[in-house]
Image: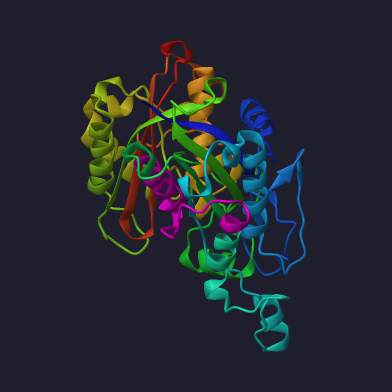
């Protein structure tokens, strides 16, 4: 028995289908540009990775909750692609998703000094995502439970890891899982600007530089993605994209926003995931890191890899997607699983967009300019979050000839 990913529904800066996303990854297209969905007057950073279809940003009325809007479309696409609700009973499908901060109409508040809920809303904004997510599950026939993970940048990875455990244990036959978040609104940009986490670079496509010596901050983004996770015995074999073999999550509470510079809790998550997969660290072929582009992130990730891999920390190939699409916060881990699937299927490590100069404090083997062709059997995907939360997922190339 193997626990496998068999379908994708996606709306992202890379595109709005699995095939479009794969082509955009292969082309190395920069998907960050100046924001089109709100007026950025007064902000020093005006860049973001917005959801695109055929390269063009999708615009919606300001009262639309883009998190829920795109999540609903992703679920519909996944259902059509996988026929999950025809193959499983409603009670056999659990819906686990990572989420983000709810929509707040701060623009209207600023102009009128009166807080108003979005049109048609009967709930306080604090509970809106919960209600909309449960509504999506109900109308699509996922009655095996709804779990919303809110651990910021680790949220969607926790949703996927928990889904993996649920299916592996037999608790549920299948899981629809991933994440949905949209940072493209005033409240998030105010918050991240005040945190000092934003890049000061005003050349939008080049602003986020994961691991690079010149990096000075991240750029935000948005996107929704869901996967179908099931046992390989029930899967349509030709539709299997990858196998999940290990997962772990830790929390160190080192600081509200800063990572532990020694990377101890992240290293623990990685070691636990490797043990969960029943493998040795030496056979992990490459690592897809969190790679935010903030000054403190890269050294902390290097420290964690050194604790697990020793001297291999400087030679094992690493990658981050955030230079290409921005930081999607509550959906970043799930979206970045696309990069892992690409690596496993194409047997390459993609170059990290905007990485040019190695940082002596984080001497990682970051692939630049051109893809690295190599044999990839096991891939490690990590994510880290505010409050010191860390996740590690081990994915394996699925060999269709094995059964």
In the rendered image of this protein, does residue 76 appear above or below residue 24? below
Q: Residue farthest to the bottom?
A: 113
Residue at x 61% of width, y 49% of height: 223
Image coords of residue 310 (percent x, y): 22, 29
Position of the C terminus, as image quadrant, is top left
Q: Is residue 208 something that shows in the picture?
A: yes
Image coords of residue 394 (percent x, y): 36, 32
Residue at x 60% of width, y 38% of height: 86
Magenta segment includes 158? yes
Residue at x 36% of width, y 22% of height: 285
| Res 314 → quadrant | top left
| Res 267 → quadrant | top left
Q: Is residue 349 something that shows in the picture?
A: no
Q: Nearer the viewer, residue 169 or 18?
A: 169
Please indicate whether residue 257 sits to the left or right of residue 19 in the image. left
Q: Nearer the viewer, residue 214 or 187?
A: 187
Magenta highlight: main SS: helix
Position of the N terminus, as image quadrant, is top left
In the rendered image of this protein, does residue 291 appear above or below residue 275? below
Q: Nearer the viewer, residue 82 or 245?
A: 82
Q: Nearer the viewer, residue 320 or 100?
A: 100
Please indicate whether residue 24 sits to the left or right of residue 195 in the image. right
Q: Which residues are magenta?
A: 136-165
Image coords of residue 107 (percent x, y): 69, 76
């Amino acid at each position: 028995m193997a626990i496998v990913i068999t379908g994708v529904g996606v709306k992202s800066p890379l595109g709005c289908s699995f095939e479009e996303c794969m082509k955009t990854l292969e082309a190395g297209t920069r998907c960050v540009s100046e924001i089109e969905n709100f007026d950025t007057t007064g902000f020093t950073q005006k860049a973001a990775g917005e959801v695109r279809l055929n390269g063009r940003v999708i615009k919606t009325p300001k009262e639309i909750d883009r998190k829920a809007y795109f999540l609903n479309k992703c679920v519909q696409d996944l259902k059509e692609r996988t026929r999950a609700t025809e193959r499983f009973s409603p009670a056999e499908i659990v819906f686990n998703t990572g989420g983000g901060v709810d929509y707040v109409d701060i623009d209207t508040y600023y102009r009128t000094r009166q807080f108003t809920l979005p049109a048609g809303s009967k709930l306080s904004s604090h509970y809106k995502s919960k209600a909309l997510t449960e509504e999506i599950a109900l109308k699509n026939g996922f009655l095996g439970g709804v779990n919303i993970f809110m651990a910021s940048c680790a949220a969607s990875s926790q949703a996927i890891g928990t889904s993996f455990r649920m299916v592996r244990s037999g608790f549920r036959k299948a899981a629809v899982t991933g994440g949905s978040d949209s940072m493209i609104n005033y409240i998030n940009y105010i918050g991240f600007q005040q945190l000092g986490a934003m890049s000061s670079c005003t050349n939008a496509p080049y602003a986020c530089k994961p691991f690079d010596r010149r990096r000075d901050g991240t750029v935000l983004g948005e996107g929704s993605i869901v996967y179908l996770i099931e046992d390989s015995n029930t899967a349509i074999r030709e539709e299997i994209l990858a196998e999940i073999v290990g997962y772990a999550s830790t929390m160190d509470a080192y600081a509200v926003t800063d990572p532990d510079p020694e990377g101890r809790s992240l290293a623990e998550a990685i070691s636990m995931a490797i043990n969960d997969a029943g493998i040795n660290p030496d056979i992990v072929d490459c690592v897809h890191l969190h790679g935010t582009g903030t000054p403190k992130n890269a050294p902390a990730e290097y420290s964690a890899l050194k604790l697990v891999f020793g001297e291999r920390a400087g030679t094992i190939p690493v990658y981050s997607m955030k230079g290409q699409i921005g930081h999607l916060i509550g959906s970043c881990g799930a979206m970045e699983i696309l990069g892992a699937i690409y690596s496993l299927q194409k047997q390459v490590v993609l170059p990290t967009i905007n990485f040019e100069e190695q940082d002596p404090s984080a001497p990682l083997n970051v692939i630049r300019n051109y893809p690295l062709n190599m044999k990839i059997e096991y891939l490690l995907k990590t994510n880290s979050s505010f409050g010191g939360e860390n996740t590690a997922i081990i994915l394996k190339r699925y060999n269709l000839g094995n059964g």
